[in-house]
Amino acid sequence: MSIVVTGATGHLGRHVVRNLLEKVPADQVTAVVRDRDRAADLAALGVRIAVADYNAPETFDGLFAAGDRVLLVSGNEFDKGRVRQHTVVIDAAQKAGVALLAYTSAPESLKAALADDHRATEAVLTGSGVPYVLLRNGWYHENYTEQLAPVLEHGAVVQAAGDGRVSSASRADYAAAAVAVLTGEGHENATYELGGDEAWSFAEYAAELSRQTGREIVYTPVSVEAYTGILTGAGVPGPLADVFAGVDASIAKGELVVSTGDLSRLTGRPTTPLSEAVAAALKG
Ligand SMILES: NC(=O)c1ccc[n+]([C@@H]2O[C@H](COP(=O)([O-])OP(=O)(O)OC[C@H]3O[C@@H](n4cnc5c(N)ncnc54)[C@H](OP(=O)(O)O)[C@@H]3O)[C@@H](O)[C@H]2O)c1
């Protein structure tokens, strides 16, 4: 029996593996990675490394064992058919008879195109007969705090989100929720709507940046069309720019406010405030 984490060399996956090691011995943890060399730090922690690719079903043959608890971290290859990719993992988990498969999804309230793959994957998973957990992760603070260079350069947060609010949390918070589910009991076939305790607006985010940098940083709301143009002008491919701009349109409609309290309840602590993520990012 192992706790198996896919996407283990990704940002969220690394948090999950490290957090798991505070709860279970390393020999009970398997990190699924695409590139063994990039997993050297994880191997050094004593976890088992398995190499597999969502695009190659045969790489998942025999990877899972009966009774395993699995975290399927959703992929990031938007152009490669993520539902098909995720189905590869779900099929392998079903075949092996895993005890639990938790999937990192998106909030039910999010209607942007970005959520389509998640809804379709959820349907595959819930129809598979595998005991599942839907971790409907809200937005990461880091989506913004790791993109500060242009904001600091221009003294402006430019988004197409109007006065919309976002209840984001840190990746570490979502990772802790995943670990709670993977190491806890009684989560079979549960759905969690996960988000930060505090929702904030981009005007408040700009004010927080001003406070912490001592410089004037303003929020400049723009239209969805203008925002798409700014993104493509900065080199973001058109289809991806549409996806990002679509998320802003959703934020404007309040679709990324999650007020269930599920995240702090699962982790047993308040979620990380946005101000802390800003401070961490400014420190570099
Ligand atoms: N809630 C949010 O705000 C938010 C924001 C961004 C993304 N997401 C979603 O949440 C996921 C985790 O977030 P993150 O920050 O950890 O993203 P990330 O750092 O981009 O990690 C994505 C992980 O998926 C793995 N992966 C992608 N394609 C794969 C494939 N074909 N086969 C096997 N593994 C594959 C990557 O492997 P490598 O390490 O080998 O590249 C990586 O480990 C993302 O992939 C995305 O679906 C959520």
Image: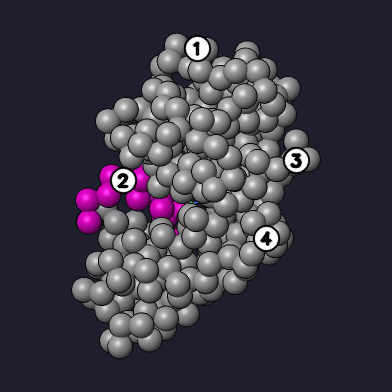
**Which quadrant of the view contains residue 94?**
top right
Q: Secondary structure at mark 3?
A: loop
**Residue at x 37% of width, y 69% of height:** 280
Q: Secondary structure at mark 1?
A: loop
- Residue under numbered circle 3: 185
Distance between mark 1 and mark 4 Cα atoms: 36 Å
Q: Residues within 10 Å of mark 1 (few under 14, many from 20)?
A: some
Does any portion of residue 136 appear in the rendered image?
A: no
Q: Earlier in the sequence, mark 1 or mark 4?
A: 1
Q: Residues within 10 Å of mark 3 (few under 14, many from 20)?
A: few
Q: Residue 61 has which mark?
A: 1
Q: Nearer the viewer, residue 219 or 279?
A: 279
Does any portion of residue 49 appear in the rendered image?
A: yes
Q: Nearer the viewer, residue 97 or 143?
A: 97
173 in relation to 276, above or below: above
**Which quadrant of the view contains residue 149?**
bottom left
* Colour setting: one colour
- Residue under numbered circle 2: 238
- Residue under numbered circle 4: 268
Q: Residue furthest right?
A: 186
Magenta region: which residues? 234-251
Distance between mark 3 and mark 2 Cα atoms: 44 Å
Q: Earlier in the sequence, mark 4 or mark 2?
A: 2
258 in relation to 14, above or below: below
